[in-house]
Image (cartoon, rainbow, N blue to C red):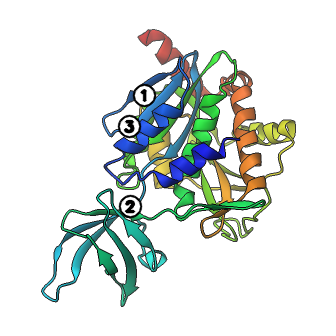
Amino acid sequence: MNLHNFVELCMCPAPLGNEHTAKQLIRSMLPNGLEISEDVAGSAIVRKPGEKPGLTFFASLSQPVVLVTGKKSDGAWELQPLGTGKTLEPMNGWKVMDSGGAQAKLEVKDGALRLTEDRGVQIGSLLTRQPDWTQDVLSVSCAGIEDRVGCWLLTELLREMPDVKAEITCIFLAQEQHCTKVAELAMNETDAAVAIRLASAKVNDINLTGAPVNAGGGPVLKLRERYVSTDGRLMDLERMACREAGVPFQYEVLELDVTGLCTAQYGHCGVVVGGIDVPAEEGRILLTDLRNTRALVMQLAANADQIQQALCSLPAVQHLAQTTKEER
């Protein structure tokens, strides 16, 4: 488990729409022999060639940003948050910075976002959350770690890719927090039978099931299956992989959300869409949860051939396989 790479990913900014530096860092972490390309949105697509339709893992690369657009008559900065979610309150107290050395603190007051303690800020500054990595024997912590853990899991997989026949693709999604169709664009490049999102889940978040996410409980398995394949087969395969890897897990069955729907219904995309989340609490992740989620991702990749065979009877997968064969 390469925590040094995790530190580097957390410390490297990837502001929404300007992820170039982060993509260069990721390239430097990867071994030779992989196919690396980018789609029109700037997502990095890394592929181990093999039989199609294959298996795709994907994670969001971009960090939420605050763009400084001007100044108000009272001297306060005009701010435009991008990719930060529907409410501003979670951003209260964030320390932010940009690549030019600007620093500030965010304050949410009366429903409005403002900067305090700002230094070096100017119009056009693209502010991301300032990282503050710490580590002890039980956990790792960093502001914004929830946005980086999925990408780290992808790099771990790409560095130890299993020897399987199926094609395995890893996608580092750029600008997804600004446009949900970015996932659709990237998935159109993969011809994957299965797509699995790697991300994080808030501890004690009851989501749709009423069952809270527990720290130390292992990865959270989320089912986002396409409407043609709601028989739960992917969830069964993920639970089997957990048992094979000796990984504890917690799971919930989710309805398709907007992002999942876009990912699932367009072009040559993942026919079955699932999610694996690392439990995270206020920027802190237990090392046991990190190891267990990594072990599950590795086991699923090692089982790629079996997963491909188990799902190939689904009509939509058969259609995708036939379409891929005809286009060769």
Q: Is residue 245 left or right of residue 287?
A: right
Labelled disc at residue 286: none
Label 1 with label 3: CB-CB less than 8 Å: yes
Q: Residues within 10 Å of mark 2 (few under 14, many from 20)?
A: some
Q: Residue beneath label 3, please?
A: 185
Q: Residue beneath label 1, please?
A: 189
Residue visible at 42% across and 53% down in the picture = 13
Toward the viewer: 137 or 34? 137
Instruction: Give the amino acid at mark 3.
Output: Leu
Q: Between marks 1 and 3, how big is the CA–CA gap?
A: 7 Å
Element under disc 3? helix
Element under disc 1? loop
Q: Tell me where residue 234 sits by quadrant.
A: top right
Provide residue 75's location: percent of width, then percent of height.
Answer: 17, 85
Q: Is residue 43 left or right of residue 167?
A: left
Q: Tell me where residue 238 sits by quadrant.
A: top right
Image quadrant occupied by the C terminus: top left
Q: Residue beneath label 2, please?
A: 83
